[in-house]
Image: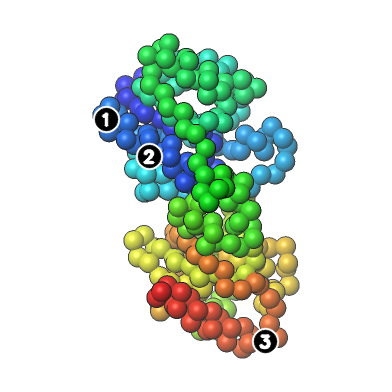
Amino acid sequence: MDLKKRVIALGFFDGVHKGHGALLDAVAETARRLNASATAFTFDRSPSAYITGDSVPLLTTVDDRAWLMRSLYGIEEVVVSNFDRMMRLDWRDFITDYLIRDLNVAHVVAGHDFHFGYMGKGNPVRLRESCQELGIGCDIIQKVEQDGITISSTYIRSLIAQGEMAHALEFLGHPHILTGTVRHGQKLGGNTLGFPTVNLIIPQNVVIPAFGVYATKVYLGAECHVAVTNVGVRPTVSQDNSKVTVEGYLLDYAGDLYGKELRIEFYTRLRGEKKFSSLHALSEEIAHNADQTRAYFSE
């Protein structure tokens, strides 16, 4: 048995936005007070997608969620649970067997709409009452609003899908991110267009930003570079309009990035994706987008 005492945030956390941040802040504060490990619980896949059968894209991957929780909110441990197992577990057993016996939880924090256990029969009222009976602390966090809008993953997904990254940042509390390993592209960036490039693919089931060109920052570890990043099917250089790629043109950088792990932060959309008459015309437009990007970040 793991004897480490935990304070835990309960939720799906398909990304990390300001609404989630209210839970995570409460966990971190209580964990410091109780000298416990600040922990977050999440599922390995979307409960709503499983229940409804609909395809519900995620804001970020599990790994990106964990990184955001740790770096922004001081969460020490992220527990990723198998949803298939949890959906068959009685809600009482989820509390007594899983949270208390297996994870040694001393305090739980959940959102006002959190449901758990078989058929979602566990709810905030039952959670609070059970915790009180068992001598476990419990905080239920009410919905968080901004500008009269409830902060939710659904709303933020719609912003990202429309390319409204600056607006999404206001509700996320951080730029939308994508992390991946650089793979080989068509090698047009450095050889033909005059810009070193990084090529990533969007992970399966993660929201795809609106096709177009974005002002971004690319992080290689702690090293940061400003970049012009295209999301889309690259109609000027590719005939395959079914393959969505993310291609970043790093400004003022020289070096081979193939095989390196990096993180892209999206700040604002500069234009939609379009097909150019030639590679020369595309190169000129990228140079213009580079100037726009430098200006954006200099402000």
**In the visual, does 10 lie left or right of 243?**
left
Quadrant assignment, res 74:
top left
Query: What residue is pinned by disc 3?
Result: 278
The residue type indicated by label 3 comes to Ser
Residue at the location (61% across, 20% down)? 121
The label number, if any, that marks residue 33 in the structure image:
1
Query: What residue is pinned by disc 2?
Result: 25
Depth check: give the residue in front, 123 or 5. 123
Does the rendering let one see residue 30? yes
Query: On screen, 36 above or below 150?
Result: above
Q: What is the secondary structure assignment of the residue under circle 2? A: helix
Q: What is the secondary structure assignment of the residue under circle 1? A: helix
Are there few (<14), some (14-19), or many (20+) residues within 10 Å of tag 3?
few
Are there few (<14), some (14-19), or many (20+) residues within 10 Å of tag 2?
many
Q: Position of residue 21 (x, y in %)?
A: 43, 43
Depth check: give the residue in front, 175 or 247. 175
**In the visual, does 67 lie left or right of 84?**
left
Query: Which circle's residue, 2 or 1, is located before the other in the chain?
Result: 2
Does the rendering let one see residue 208? no
Spatial CA distance of label 3 from label 2 is: 51 Å
The residue type indicated by label 1 comes to Arg
**In the visual, does 30 lie left or right of 51?**
left
The residue type indicated by label 2 comes to Asp
Name the front one of labels 3 and 2: 2
Of the 4 image quadrants, the one containing the N terminus is top left
Q: Position of residue 116 (x, y in %)?
A: 57, 25
Query: Which circle's residue, 3 or 1, is located before the other in the chain?
Result: 1
Query: On screen, 49 above or below 133?
Result: below
Spatial CA distance of label 2 from label 1 is: 13 Å
Query: Which circle's residue, 3 or 2, is located before the other in the chain?
Result: 2
